[in-house]
Structures are given as structure tokens and as C-alpha cells.
Image: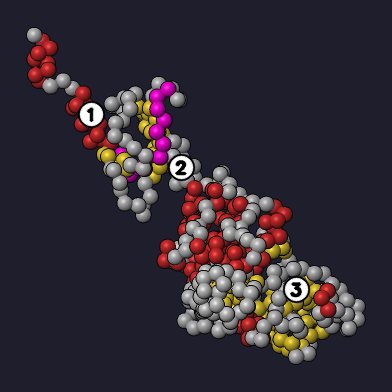
Amino acid sequence: MSSCTACGFQLYQEGKACPACGSAEQAMTIVQERKPSVEIVEPTSPSSKGTGGRYVIPKGRVIGERYQIQKLIGRGGMGSVYEVQDLKENRVLALKILTQVAMEDDSEQRFMREFEMLSKMNHPAVLKVYGWGRYEDQLYFVSEFVSGRDLKSEIKTRGPWPADDAAKLAAVVADALAVAHSMGIVHRDIKPHNIMIANDGSVRLLDFGVARKTGGGMETLTKTGMIVGTPEYMSPEQFGTHRVDERSDLYSLGVVLFELLTGQIPFGGETPVVIAMKVIQQPPVAPQSVRKDIPEWVDRIVVKCMEKDPQNRYLTAAQLAEDLRKPHAKARPTMRRLPNGDNVVLDTNEDAKIALILATEKEKPFWSISMALRFSEKFYKLQEIIPAGVKGPRWYYHFSKWPEEEILRGLIDYDQHFQETEAASKPSFFKRLFAKQ
């Protein structure tokens, strides 16, 4: 599918000016990666073929003089994965072999790049690889065997996850990315399909086939105008000629976390072009807009990951993992009566939408929505005013914590305001003098 890189309009005659905006710029083609699917096939003869006419290695065949085929356990865009018995070490492993029908001309390079990168990384959430070779002119490599389900299937079955569980899983993936990024490796295809949950509950980050080393070859738009990836999880910069870096992976992980929390993706559409335009143009979607009960702290993390400008995201995967693991114990709100008769309720929890409530006998003149209030050396933003008679005889002023990135507007110092109000309410010397006469 092709579209104009200037306005996003779908082109029906490539090479000609865009019928929508008149631009003659190169068309952008988005090619979606095939989503991994699991097919259990156990052929009985060497000529057996699986679905789609692809050759399936028969059960019992020994590859590389040591890996005996047990069964086909998965099939993706680049390769098929088999459960094998290592006859020399007497252990069960996984063997991934390049498919005969390759999707791209550089499939062998991608395949070997995946093996090379996996062999350099040492992390529990990254597959261990043990070797590679050729079988009937097809490349293969052998890795540890992990039995489980991909995260996309888990989301479909389980639905939205609790915030703590979702954050815990995302933190493990962020750890794995931190290791990859420290070696100059950018994954570029973070999505639930490439995250596996093993039967023992451990997590694996899979498919480094499109990963790249930073510093070279990091453009996502090829000379022919083709973008390879899954649009729903791609960062804005992956749709253009801009270079991508580690922060692109953090954007994609933010989308995965959004889906974990809500059960849906933030930007969808009928075509890849529609999705691309939404990802590029629309502001980040807050998970709380879909599920009201999502805690503020994890909502904030997701929105920060999905910022359009990479400079506004987390700088590193390690920082993201640290934020995801911060304790979020609930402290009880405190209430007290102030000397002037006002009642105050303070909520110090990070995810508190209302951090300060002031209940007053009289209306606070000149107080308005979005003004800043300084109270006990902290700053708050007025979100709501409830007049007397609605919830009782008092006026209620609801404040949130003042956003750090915003400039203080209409600042009122509560202590100073209280003192000025008290002084204004006291009769002057002349009023007291005339009152006595």
C-alpha cells in the first residue's frame, strides 16, 4: 500500500503527482510484518508439507549430526521453529531455520544478524543461542527451548491486566532492552507478538531479525520507499526518513504497556496509512481515557513513553525499568483544621488526582480554575470549585499537584493570603474609635 509522504493520501498511480496535494514526492510503502502464528504439524514422510505449501522437516530427521527433529512448533515470516533433541547434550532445544519462501532479498543477512546479536547478549529475558549451520542450503540456528505463549495471545485470552502485573512484565522487557542498547543494538520491532511468557512465568523478548546497530543503517525508510514493521507499534520517527535510536524501542514498549492495561491499541485504523498518520499527528493517548481505574503513576509512564518527540521520552530503558518498579504504597489522606477555620485534606500518593482539598466557610474571592496555590511549601493547581450548598454549607476547592513542566500561573501563597484576609477583616483604629462613641 502506497501513500503520499507529504499528506498521506493513498496513491493509485505511483510516479505521478499526488491527486490530493499535488506533491510529486516519493511514495511511502508500509509493509506489515507477518504476525507469528503457531502451527503444530507432525509430518510422517520427507516430502510432507505444512500449510501454505511450505516444506516441513519430518520428525526424526537429524540436522547437523546432533539435532533430532521432534515437531514443528512455530512459523513466522522469516523462519520455522522446531523442537529438537540435542543428541550430544541430551537436552531439548529450539531450532529456527530460514523458510524456503523468503519475504525479502536480505533474509539471510537478517537471519544471521539475529543470531549474532542474540549470541552477544546475556540476559534471562533474551534467548540463549548455541550454534548455527546449514541444512539443504537453508540457514538455521539453535537456541534454548521455551514453552509458553506470546503476549498477544495472553492479552486476547486474559483481557486487560492489573497495573502492577503489567508494569512488572514491562520492566523485564525494559531490562532486556537496556542490555541490548548498551551494546548499541536497537530492536525496532517491539510488540506483544515478540514477547513470550513461558510456562514458568518467565519472560522472553524474541525476534531480533530487524534489529540494527546504532550509528549506521538506522534509517527506516529504504531507497524504494518501503517501511518494514507493524504500524500499530511503530514510533513516529519509524515512518519517516529520520534515524531511530533506543528511544524508538521505548515508544513501542509504551504501546505494549498501553495494550496490557486497556486490552486495545492506542492508534488503530483500517489501513497502515491511516494508522501511520494517527501515530505521527495525534497526541499520546492516556490509558485512563479508556480505563478510569488505571493508577495515575502508570498512566504517566505510558504517556511519557509515547511522546511524539523522542527527547520527551525516557532517556534510557534502565530509567524506564526503574520507574516501573518504584513502590507505590498507598498512604491514607490526612485531614486537619487550620487556625482560620478552613479544613484541609492532603493526599500524598503519587497517583492522587486530587492532592489537596480546602473546605472553607466563605468563598475565596479571586480564586479561579488553573491558578497555582502554594501550601506548606508545595504547589498545587486548582481543578474544581464546588459552591456552598452543593455538598453542604462549605465551599470546596479541589487541587491537583502542579505539573513540573508548567510555569506557575496566578500564584497565591495560602499563608500570605490568610494573613491578608485576617488583617482586612479586623476593624481599623478609627472604626474602633467611632464604635465606642
Place of residue 32 in the rendered image (x, y in percent of width and height, measured from the top left): 65, 72
> In which quarter of the view is residue 80 placed?
bottom right
Find residue 75 and name its label.
3
What is the number of callouts on the image? 3
In front here: 280 or 4?
4
Disc on the earlier residue, 3 or 1: 3
In the displayed structure, would residue 225 be above or below residue 329? below
Marks 1 and 2, how far apart at CA: 29 Å
Q: Is residue 388 left or right of residue 243?
A: left
From the image, tell me which residue sits under label 1: 421
For the residue labelled by badge 3, is the local secondary structure a helix, a strand or a loop?
Answer: strand
Identify which amino acid the numbered label 1 is placed on: Thr
Q: Earlier in the sequence, mark 3 or mark 2?
A: 3
Residue placed most toward the observer, 265 or 172: 265
Q: Which mark is residue 353?
A: 2
Q: Residue at x 36, y 42 (%)?
A: 370
Q: Quadrant of the N terminus?
A: bottom right
* Residue that protrudes farthest toward the top in the picture: 437
